[in-house]
Structure formats: structure tokens, C-alpha cells
Amino acid sequence: MLKKNQNQNIVICPSVLAADFAKLAEEMETIASSDWLHFDVMDGHYVPNISFGPIVASAIKPHTDLLLDVHLMITNPDQYLEVFAKSGADNITIHQEVATHGLRTIQRIKELGCSAGIAINPGTSISTLEEYLPYVDLILIMTVNPGFGGQAYIESMYEKIKRTKDMINESGRDIFLQVDGGISSENIENVAKMGANAFVAGSAIFSKKDREAEIAIMRTAAEKGYKANL
């Protein structure tokens, strides 16, 4: 299940998609000070790319203490919930756009012992999330169009993040607000000011020689922005 460290507002989530797959175990050691390990699963149908599946999750799990945050960018998530739960997923996030019976899928994720998240793409209205608020542990706002790492943050997402945070606050529930796409030390403070508290970053972390230092910089900047939002 997802959790934050005590007295910690911000969650940093390096994306495995940007890691060196020839030495994944060693890569995990370089990001040990982060919080969750974001696992982008792509099927070549829902998004125009193919990444990896539960076998890779099972291989990584013994080499990290980070919580495994599985993001299913696939057309048929229901078929893969159990196998990812068995592979060590702590959270499973599905996309609203392909959730045929979304609330039933969320319920099944929780039955498997995982936290559950719902994600939406940049072009999807946050109004589609309203019915999920009583049931989910995490909302993921995509800040790029999903499918490829290294894309630039879409500037219009600032307002969308803020409106989503307002909606979460009105619900009275403690729901993580996660952002994914183009997040870096250069914009994370401003994104946090909008109310996000969980930040996925791939190339912004894995491209750095000293990844622990970059994680610390991002955490400090995000904390500053988040506190300004309180």
C-alpha cells in the first residue's frame, strides 16, 4: 500500500522507463533516497510504445525497498491486475479512458491487497474523476501525452492540476495527486504550488551523474512549492 514517510509531504517517484535496462539492480541503488518506483507499462495499443511487463517487476522487486507504483497504460488492465499484484505491486493505477467498468476494476485492485489509482491524459476532463473520489488512493494527471519518455511538460496542465487538487479537497479524502511527464527540478516547485504531492521523473533523474543529489534538489523545491499551497 502507498504511504508517505512521517512528516513528509512530498513523494519522489523515479520512472524505471529511463533506467539502464542492462543493469537494473545497480540502477536501483542510485535512487534509494526516493520514495516510490514508478513502473510505466505500455502495450503498443493504448499508447504508441511497448515497455515491459510483470516479469521485469518481479526481477526488480528484490533489489529495492521502494514502493512499486505500477502505471498500466494498456487497453485491457483487468487481465493483468493479479499478475502485477503477485509481482510485487504496491499500487496499481489504471487509465479512466480505457476503464470499461472502472469502479469494479478499482475494487479488484484493492481485493488483491494494493492501493488503487486512476489516471487521465492531458485531453481528458477532470469531471470524469468525480465518481472515483470515494474509492481511489491516487489520482494521476498526465502532463504529457503518454507513450514516450523525455517529453516537455505541457504548460496548460498547471491549471488542471490546481482544479484537481480543489476537487480532492472538496471531497475531504486524503488522495495522492501524482503528476507524470516532463517533471524536473526546473518546474517541480511550480507544479507543487498547484497541489501535486507525488512526482514522477524519468530522464530528469536518470540522466544525472549524481541521482541522489538530483532527488534531494527536487524534493526541496517541491516541499517549498507545496507549503506555499497550504
Image (cartoon, rainbow, N blue to C red):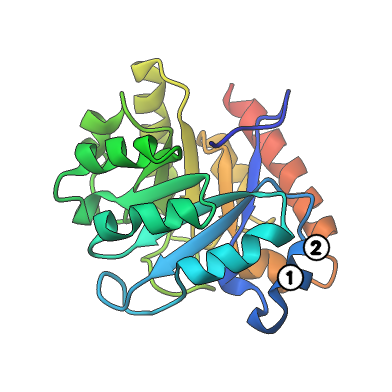
SS at badge 1: helix
> Badge 2 local density, few (<14 within 10 Å), some, or many (20+)?
some
SS at badge 2: helix
Q: Residue furthest bottom?
A: 22
Task: Tell which tag, 1 or 2, sits nearer the viewer.
Answer: 1
Residue 128 place in picture, x, y as percent: 20, 40
Q: In percent of the image, x 55 and y 71: which residue is there? A: 17
**Residue linked to disc 1:** 25
Verify CB contact (< 8 Å) between mark 1 and mark 2. yes
Q: Quadrant of residue 112?
A: top left
Q: Quadrant of residue 193?
A: top right
Q: Nearer the viewer, residue 79 or 66?
A: 79
Q: In percent of the image, x 38 and y 66: which residue is there? A: 146
Q: In percent of the image, x 41 and y 63: which residue is there? A: 144
Residue 111 against residue 203 in the figure, above or below:
above
Residue 158 place in picture, x, y as percent: 45, 45
Mark 1 belongs to which amino acid? Ala
Residue 97 place in picture, x, y as percent: 21, 54
Mark 2 belongs to which amino acid? Glu
**Residue linked to disc 2:** 29
Q: In percent of the image, x 71 and y 35: which residue is there? A: 224
